[in-house]
Image: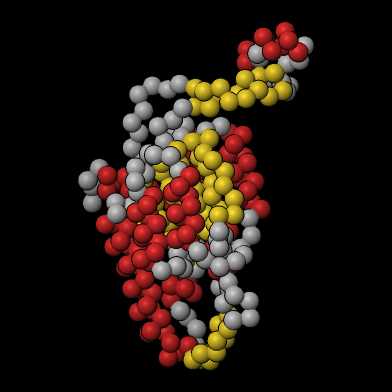
Amino acid sequence: MEGFLKGLHFSARRGSSTEFIEHRAYAPGDEIRRIDWRTFGRTDRYFLKEYEDETNLRATLVLDASGSMGYASAGITKLRYATLLAGALGYLLLAQRDAVGLAIVGASLRRYIPPKATPRHLAGIFSALESVAPEGETRLAECIHGVAGLARRRSFIIIISDFLDEPASVLESIAHLRRGSEALLLHVMDPAEEEFPFTGWTVFRDAERPGAKARLDARQMRDIYLENLAEHLSALRTGATALGADHAVVSTRRPFDDALAAYLDARARRREGKP
C-alpha cells in the first residue's frame, strides 16, 4: 500500500510538531521512556502521554450507506467495496501523518468521527466501517452540506458513493465544500448498473423504498437507461471539474486496490503534467 502514496495530495508541511491529547494506562510492551513520571508521582500508577501530530491536512472520508449501496448483481456489494476503499485511503493518509475522520451518511448524517492522526483513532474508524449497514434513502447533497459545516479550512473531503442524487444538488454541496477544501468524488458502480444486462420482462425493486417496484421490458428500456446514465455521469464529471474537484468511477468488478492504484497514478501524472 505504501507504493500508492505519491500523488494523494500536495504537502505544505515544513517540519512537524505534536499536540498532547490524553493519558492512557501503561501496557506491557509500551516504551518505558514514554511514561509520564510526574503523573506516576501523583497517582503511583503508570500512564503514557498520547500525542497527535499537528498536520497540514485533515481528511474526512464521507461514506454513503444508503439502501442503494447494498446492491450487488454478483459478489461484493457497493457498500462493502466502498468500505474497503475508505479503509485503504484512511491507512494511506495516516501513513502520510495526516489526520483522518469519517462521516457515515444516508438519509442524514448517521455518524461523524472528527479527524485525528493516531493509529488508535484509525482503528476506531475501521471498526465503524466494519459495522456499517445499508439503509434508508439517499440524501447525499444534504449530508455533504452538513459535513461542510463541520470541516475545517484546508480539509480534504473524499466522498465514496453511488451518487444516486440529482447532480445539480450534489455539485452545489461540493461547491460548499470547496471553500478552502479539496474534494474527491469516488463513484462506486456495480457492473449491472454500468451495462444494464437485463433481457425480457424484469421486475425492478427500489432498494431504498420497501415495496416500490416496477415490471418493465428491459430490452426496450436499455437504450433509454444507458443514455440517462451517460448524461448523469457527464453532469457529475463536468461539474466536478469546473469546481476543481476530481470525479472517478470505480467498478466493483475490479479489485479495489487496483482501482485505487490506477486513480492515484493518474492523479500524480496529471499534477506533474504528464500524459
Indicate the position of residue 141 as horizontal and vertical percent values.
Answer: 44, 60
Q: How many marks?
A: 0
* Residue 262 showing in the rendered view: no
Q: Residue at x 53, y 27 (%)?
A: 52
Left or right: 37, with 251 as reference point: right
- Asked if 30 appears above or below 198 in the picture, the reply is above
Indicate the position of residue 269 as horizontal and vertical percent values.
Answer: 28, 46
Left or right: 26, with 96 as reference point: right
Camera-nearest residue between 193 and 58 = 58
How is this picture coloured? secondary structure
Q: Which corner quadrant of the image does residue 3 belong to?
A: top left
Q: Which corner quadrant of the image does residue 132 belong to?
A: bottom right
Q: Residue at x 45, y 43 (%)?
A: 151
- Asked if 215 appears above or below 151 in the picture, the reply is below
Q: Residue at x 68, y 24 (%)?
A: 24
Indicate the position of residue 203 as horizontal and vertical percent values.
Answer: 57, 86
* Residue 66 showing in the rendered view: yes
Camera-nearest residue between 232 and 2 = 232
Left or right: 271, with 182 as reference point: left
- Asked if 194 appears above or below 119 in the picture, the reply is below
Camera-nearest residue between 140 and 159 = 140
Indicate the position of residue 100 as horizontal and vertical percent values.
Answer: 50, 40
